[in-house]
Image (spheres, rainbow, N blue to C red):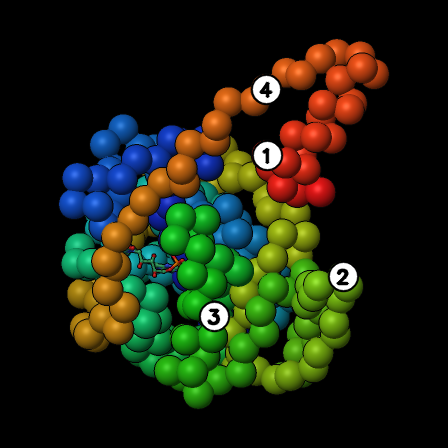
């Protein structure tokens, strides 16, 4: 089976991200980038699918040369091939999904895995958009997956519970935390990944549909107030919550 997994290169969760002077992008100076955490689950499920059905896992990312680092990590986890869809222009989700789906039309996978969202821009649009461009079905926030023949049974996380759905290949699956336990790259995997080539292709062009007008940080929280540290403070606390904070 040909399996495609799409991965994004995002700022490390511990990085303090600042807004660039243009007010519409993030300042990448000093930012450490990592493989998008939800993509670890997507890669693991792609590898498990290959272990069950045979075939190959191709990992693909759209962006600049820095994305190679992320692709290399995916290769060290066990992906067979990597493709960088090279593009440095400002792209929205629509345009990225278009380019990824055009690549899928070339590669012809039976299943595409993506993460449930990128932890930087949080659009969560890729799964549905890629499926729409390909005219495939898609299932989002998947926490359990079983593929038998061309039949797909997926368990999704929904508010307050889980939902089990059935569908069929070809399909786009968005991976949620809990879908599996992502493997760590082994030393052998890391060494082998250095020998695996990363192919570069120009990303298919499509006009953006969304224009970022402004980015801003949340307003700083006002300092906390200590009213007292024994029961005598309760009356004043209730008054302040009622009259100042207006929450009760
Ligand atoms: C070259 C470039 C320039 C950009 N410039 C700007 C900018 O100036 N301002 C701005 O606001 N945004 C910018 N972006 C970010 C871009 O708009 C978002 O990354 C895009 O909208 C995807 O949304 P998301 O990251 O929230 O994806 P989601 O839909 O949340 O991602 C879900 C999943 O889709 C897959 N995926 C997402 N992105 C990629 C990718 N690039 N390659 C492969 N798989 C992917 C991953 O599996 C991911 O887990 C840029 C992105 C690129 C690649």
Q: Marks 4/1: CA distance?
A: 12 Å
Q: Which residue is mark 3?
A: 127
The label number, if any, that marks residue 160 in the structure image? 2
Q: Which residue is mark 4?
A: 225
Q: Position of residue 84 (x, y in %)?
A: 27, 57
The answer to whether the residues at label 3 and label 4 have Cβ atoms under 8 Å apart is no
Task: Tell me if residue 50 can be seen.
Answer: no
Q: Please determine whether, in this image, residue 131 is positioned above or below residue 63.
A: below
State the SS at label 2: loop
Q: Marks 2/3: CA distance?
A: 22 Å
Q: Which residue is mark 1?
A: 244
The label number, if any, that marks residue 205 in the structure image? none
Q: Residue furthest bottom?
A: 135
Counting labels gives 4
Where on the image, by quarter, is ligand 1?
A: bottom left
Query: Of the residues tagged 4 and 2, which is closer to the observer?
Result: 4
**Mark 2 surroundings: few (<14), some (14-19) or many (≥20) residues within 10 A:** few
State the SS at label 1: loop
First-in-chain label (4 vs 1):
4
Q: Marks 3/4: CA distance?
A: 45 Å
First-in-chain label (4 vs 2):
2
69 and 22: which is toward the camera: 22
Q: Position of residue 160 (x, y in %)?
A: 76, 61
Q: Position of residue 241 (x, y in %)?
A: 67, 34
- Viewed as shown, does residue 83 lie left or right of 3? left
Q: Marks 2/1: CA distance?
A: 34 Å
Query: Of the residues tagged 4 and 1, which is closer to the observer?
Result: 1
Q: Position of residue 142 (x, y in %)?
A: 64, 65
Q: Quadrant of residue 138?
A: bottom right
The answer to whether the residues at label 4 and label 1 have Cβ atoms under 8 Å apart is no
């Amino acid at each position: 089976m040909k399996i495609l997994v799409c991965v994004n290169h995002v700022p490390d969760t511990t990085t303090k991200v600042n807004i660039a002077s243009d007010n519409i992008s993030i300042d990448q100076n000093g930012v450490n980038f990592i493989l998008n955490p939800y993509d670890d689950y997507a890669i693991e499920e792609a590898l498990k699918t290959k272990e069950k059905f045979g075939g190959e896992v191709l990992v693909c990312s759209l962006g600049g040369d820095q994305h190679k680092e992320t692709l290399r990590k995916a290769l060290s986890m066990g992906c067979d091939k990597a493709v960088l869809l090279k593009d440095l222009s400002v792209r929205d989700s629509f345009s990225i999904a278009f380019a990824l789906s055009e690549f899928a039309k070339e590669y012809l996978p039976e299943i595409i895995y993506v993460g449930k969202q990128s932890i930087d821009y949080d659009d969560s649009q890729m799964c549905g958009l890629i499926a729409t461009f390909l005219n495939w079905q898609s299932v989002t926030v998947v926490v359990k997956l079983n593929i038998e023949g061309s039949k797909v049974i997926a368990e999704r996380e929904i508010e307050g519970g889980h939902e089990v759905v059935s569908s069929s290949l070809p399909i786009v699956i968005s991976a949620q935390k809990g879908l599996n336990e992502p493997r760590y790259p082994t030393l052998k995997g890391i060494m082998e990944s250095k020998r695996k080539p990363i192919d570069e292709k120009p990303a298919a062009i499509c006009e953006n549909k969304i224009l970022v007008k402004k980015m801003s940080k949340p307003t700083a929280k006002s300092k906390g107030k200590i009213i007292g540290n024994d029961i005598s403070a309760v009356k004043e606390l209730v008054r302040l919550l009622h009259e100042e904070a207006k929450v009760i």
